[in-house]
Image (tube, rainbow, N blue to C red):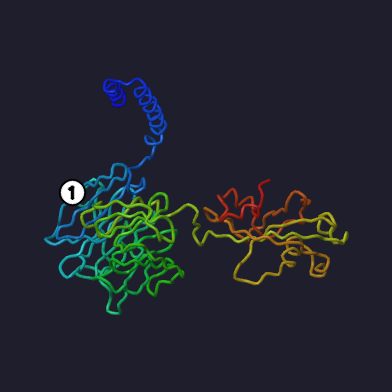
Amino acid sequence: MFVYVYLILLKIKCTNRSIRAFMTKGLIIGLAAIMLLLPTISNRSVYATHLATSSQVWGIEAGTISKIHHFDPTTDTTTPISRVPTSSVENGRGIASDGTNIWYTFVGNSFQGDGKIHKIAPTGGPDISTIPDPFGSNGSGIGALDFDGKDLWALSYLPSGSNTETIFKIDSNSGTVLASCDVPFGDQGAGGDTLAIVNGKILTDAGELLNRLTEYNTPSSTGGVCARTGNVFTLPVNVTGIDTDSAGNLLATDIKTLYNLGHAPYSTIVSSQANAFPSEEDITTEPESNVQTNVCPEENVQHWDKIVFVIPNPQVAKRAHVPANTELDIKVLDDPHKVADIKKKVIDFLKLTSSDRNAIKIVDINYAIICASQAPPSTKTSLPLLSQSNVTSSPAATTEKIDPDILLKAGIKPQGDNVSSALPPSK
């Protein structure tokens, strides 16, 4: 409509025929260019212009009576979530979503905890329930929270007398501490307020408004020092709360601005939303984003060897029920913590004797790591484990190994980009 009216006005004002024709042609070309651009402009993104994430974000502010806020990245809007205070000073610290409800903590006078971790509906209202804060009332308090998709993780706020912060893995149903370990205090601010569980690892600066995140392995027992992985990430901004979105990007706040720092090493500001929150101490997204599907639990990791070999001796090949002078292969479970005797693996697999050792020629060895999504069958069960189709099936091929096909049926999937070619093929 605007272009049409503009053309009419120009036609009235331009009395010279050649000028009018020139202007009309120019405007038609310009209009065509605008029309070509319109589809690009109208189909920019499913989310709004600033944070570049589709994940909903909640935050808890630092203040006398702290509010919880919900940030919607599809509209770039922030909405306060009402809650019912239970004391006169509730200075917000940790917040985490379990996918259904929101968990939060606050500290009171002298930054000490109230002895509880609170659960509230994502729409607000009074507390649904609470579980114990491991430090109890007037203790160190909890400075940050996160869910790993199953359990609640918490970081102490005030450092201990030995200048350390404690990280807890907590059963959110009972409040029982399942595991814990200590990290050095970050030596800035009153306490620790930065924690996220990402790819099964702990990320924290164990302080306030710092720009370095240290990565630790998650503990399996209570007490002791958290084991570092060796990764330390230098961020482009100082942060308080952190969490990952559904795409695995690290979201962070420096109290007011929300940042999207992308994937590790988190060294670039991919996008940001200024004034997303009033004064947020911690943030959270849906918990499933913290457990990426390409990460395998340590207890489910299986190491396999694919051994390619030849038996030139016809008599030995006959006893093994395989063709002579033919490249064959087997797949066997491996213990990466032990030195392997490759020929012995072939001998045991084919039920040969040690006297046949020199008759076996190893051609190649491939290594694979696979992830069983559920517990694999016992390695002590006698199962038929067959090599590829060029190896003759026979009773002699039975050994105390795990059949790769059984593992595949149990939900095994490859781990890594170059593993699939070495995985036991389905038959």
Q: Which residue is mark 1?
A: 82
Identify the residue at image location x=64%, y=50%. Answer: 405
Where is residue 89 drawn, in percent x and y?
Answer: 14, 62
Describe residue 397's horizontal placement relative to residue 312 as left or right.
left
Q: Nearer the viewer, residue 306 or 252?
A: 252
Residue 296's x, y, as percent? 50, 57
Tell me the quarter of the image containing the N terminus. top left
In the rendered image, residue 243, in percent from the top left (x then y), is placed at 35, 56
* Nearer to the camera, 122 or 348: 122
Q: Is residue 239 above or below residue 46?
A: below
Label 1 packing within 10 angstroms: few (<14), some (14-19), many (20+): some
The residue most toward the right is 314
Q: Residue furthest left?
A: 88
Q: Is residue 200 left or right of residue 62?
A: right
- Name the residue rendered at 42%, 68% in the picture: 232
Judging from the image, what secondary structure is the residue with disc 1 in?
loop
Kindly identify the amino acid type of the residue bearing the numbered disc 1. Answer: Ser
Q: Residue 253 is drawn in which quadrant?
A: bottom left
Residue 91 lies in what quarter of the image? Answer: bottom left
**How many discs mark residues in the rendered view?**
1
Q: Please name the residue shown 52% across and 53% down the image.
A: 373
**Coordinates of residue 152 in the picture (x, y in percent):** 34, 59
Please tell me which residue lies in front, 310 or 378: 310
Relative height, residue 42 to residue 414 (above, below): above
Is residue 396 found left or right of 1 in the rendered image?
right
